[in-house]
Amino acid sequence: MSTRLVYVAVRAQRPSALAEFWARLLGWTVTLDRGDRVDIAPPDPGLPGPALTFRAAPPGAPAHASPNRLHLDLASYSPRQQDDRVRLALELGGDHLDIGQGAVPWVVLADPEGNEFCVLEPRPEYVGTGALAAVVVGAAAPARLAAFWSVASGWPVARNGAVAGLRSPTELGAWLEFIPHPGPGDDRLHLELGARAGTAAAERLTAAGAVARPDGGTRFLDPEHNPFCLVEAERGQPTN
């Protein structure tokens, strides 16, 4: 494959503080800290799921107002662990969030900058993921978007239906899932693909249905107009 999923990028008002929240909540480690960008990753290098990178929001960026199209789901392996994860999130500065979910077994929370995430009840499909169960993307057509991202990430479609899911061929690490979404949402979180310099990654992605963004470089829109970027796989640095 010419591209692989390497990051969930988060646009943040305070990258260092938000990265610290997520590192402590997930039990991950800081792998890069240069002030305007902080990266965190699982301490287990065998987990192939994406790392998280927190980038400074541009000056004058609007406050978070509408739900993100992309959010994170956290795993738990017992009811007690679910309670402990929720308690820790609240202690670190998170908050409960009502998005109309009603009576559900998972807990919906917001991080200190208002980004939605869920702490799931124990589910057998998330055994082996580590703390991050899934990166979840809202989609008008989940199966169609999953097919594109399967090509983009090199991960096979492991679940298809109302909710479509991709999983690393190793069957370890977080899922990439696509769920029905009623309409547009905020794009403060986006996916980044790693590509080796000199490959024809851009041509391969556009052939699969991606559209180059008007600002050019290595910034694209997927078939449902979610922004994503290419980065150099070796260093995790933007290629433009």
Image: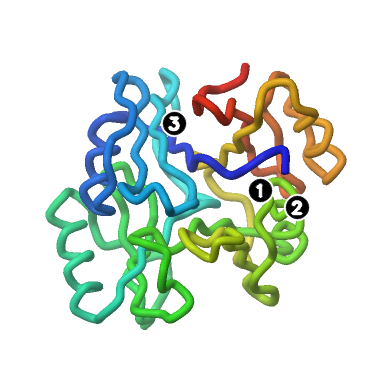
Image location of residue 209, percent across then percent down: 82, 44
Residue depicted at x 75% and y 32%: 201
Residue 181 shows in the view: no
Side of 65 where 96 appears, left or right: left
Label 3 amino acid? Answer: Pro
Label 2 amino acid? Answer: Phe
The local crowd at label 3, few if under 14, some if 14 to 19, many if 20 or more residues have their Cα within 10 Å, is few
Which quadrant holds residue 103? bottom left
Residue bearing the label numbered 2: 148
Side of 68 where 27 appears, left or right: left
Q: CA distance from mark 2 to mark 1?
A: 9 Å
Q: CA distance from mark 2 to mark 3?
A: 30 Å
Side of 233 where 118 appears, left or right: left
Image location of residue 183, percent across then percent down: 64, 57
Q: CA distance from mark 1 to mark 3?
A: 30 Å
Q: Is residue 170 above or below residue 8?
A: below
Residue depicted at x 36% and y 62%: 130
Residue bearing the label numbered 1: 153
Q: Which image quarter holds the C terminus?
A: top right
Label 1 amino acid? Answer: Ser
Of discs 1 and 3, which sits in the foreground?
Answer: 1
Residue 167 shows in the view: yes
Residue 39 disc label: none
Residue bearing the label numbered 3: 62
Q: Secondary structure at mark 2?
A: helix
The local crowd at label 1, few if under 14, some if 14 to 19, many if 20 or more residues have their Cα within 10 Å, is many
Of discs 2 and 3, which sits in the foreground?
Answer: 2
